[in-house]
Amino acid sequence: MQENIIPHNFNTTPEQRSGLKNHKPLLLWFTGLSGSGKSTIANAVEMALVKEGVHTYTLDGDNVRKGLNSNLSFSPEDRSENIRRIAEVSSLMLDAGLVVLAAFVSPYARDREQVKQIAGYSNVMEIFVNTPIDECERRDVKGLYAKARAGEIQNFTGVNAPYEAPVAPDLQIDTVNTSVEEAVAIIIALVNKKIKQ
Ligand SMILES: Nc1ncnc2c1ncn2[C@@H]1O[C@H](COP(=O)(O)OS(=O)(=O)O)[C@@H](OP(=O)(O)O)[C@H]1O
Ligand SMILES: Nc1ncnc2c1ncn2[C@@H]1O[C@H](COP(=O)(O)OP(=O)(O)O)[C@@H](O)[C@H]1O
């Protein structure tokens, strides 16, 4: 299928695009259960970065599963395709010089590994938002755990579908003992080390 696809050599390089900004590109990949705090923390981190003049873009369920990936379900195969497409989009945004924040459950280790392969290992910071299921279920922000327990949602991560916790993430945030403000400070310190060398 790919054999007749011959890329054009464009003269403008990712380095030139990135050079127009006062920072390097980076992909912050937030993974964790539904309700763990991925969107809340990504949102607060993006606000802090924008305040510092960093050019960002956030990818999460709302702008991806309702648009680009609206044809995908929560089967293991469709979740993999969801993550693959998000990784490809993130990779384009890295080429454009942005700091990308991606907040997805991304429950399978092999899919998260593929993100790093697609975007480049040194471009990805994997952040495990490590909130126990009991706490996510207590929060039940969207009422989905109650529905899943009632048998109204199939393949719900943590209830009747697996979550493979990262073994060696770049960062791990325990949201039971770390406030959003503290999490932002920890993440921003690490991000600045990478993007402002
Ligand atoms: N079956 C099932 N399992 C998990 N989550 C479900 C499911 N059905 C709907 N939702 C809602 O969809 C959000 C997860 O979408 P993602 O694209 O992040 O999932 S995945 O990475 O493809 O696994 C997730 O959003 P967050 O709560 O923001 O994580 C849920 O609100
Ligand atoms: N320390 C914390 N970090 C992140 N979220 C927290 C924290 N403490 C409580 N919360 C709450 O937990 C919920 C997390 O929801 P959300 O960010 O939508 O999770 P996710 O995107 O992982 O589904 C929010 O209502 C948020 O206010």
Image: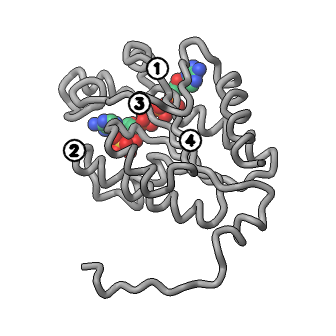
CA gap, disc 1 and disc 2: 23 Å
- Between disc 4 and disc 2, the foreground one is 4
> Looking at the image, do the residues carrying marks 4 and 3 touch, with CB atoms under 8 Å apart?
no
**Mark 4 or mark 2: whose residue is earlier in sequence:** 2
Identify the residue at image location x=66%, y=32%.
187
Identify the residue at image location x=77%, y=48%.
197
Identify the residue at image location x=57%, y=62%.
93
Identify the residue at image location x=23%, y=31%.
161
CA gap, disc 3 and disc 1: 13 Å
Whether 174 is drawn above or below 60: the answer is above
Q: Residue 153 sits in which quadrant? A: top left
Give SS at disc 2: loop
Crowding near the residue tagged with mark 1, few <14, some 14–19, many ≥20 C-alpha atoms within 10 Å: many
Q: Which residue is the site of mark 1?
A: 131
CA gap, disc 2 and disc 3: 20 Å
Quarter of the image with the N terminus in it? bottom left
Q: Nearer the viewer, residue 189 or 120?
A: 120
Crowding near the residue tagged with mark 2, few <14, some 14–19, many ≥20 C-alpha atoms within 10 Å: few
- Between disc 3 and disc 1, the foreground one is 3
Residue 108 percent location from the top left of the image: 31, 38
Mark 1 lies within 8 Å of ligand 2 (Cβ measured): yes
Residue 182 percent location from the top left of the image: 69, 22
CA gap, disc 4 and disc 3: 12 Å
Which disc is residue 75 wearing? 2
**Mark 3 or mark 1: whose residue is earlier in sequence:** 1
Residue 127 percent location from the top left of the image: 53, 34
**Mark 4 or mark 1: whose residue is earlier in sequence:** 4
Q: Which residue is the site of mark 4?
A: 125
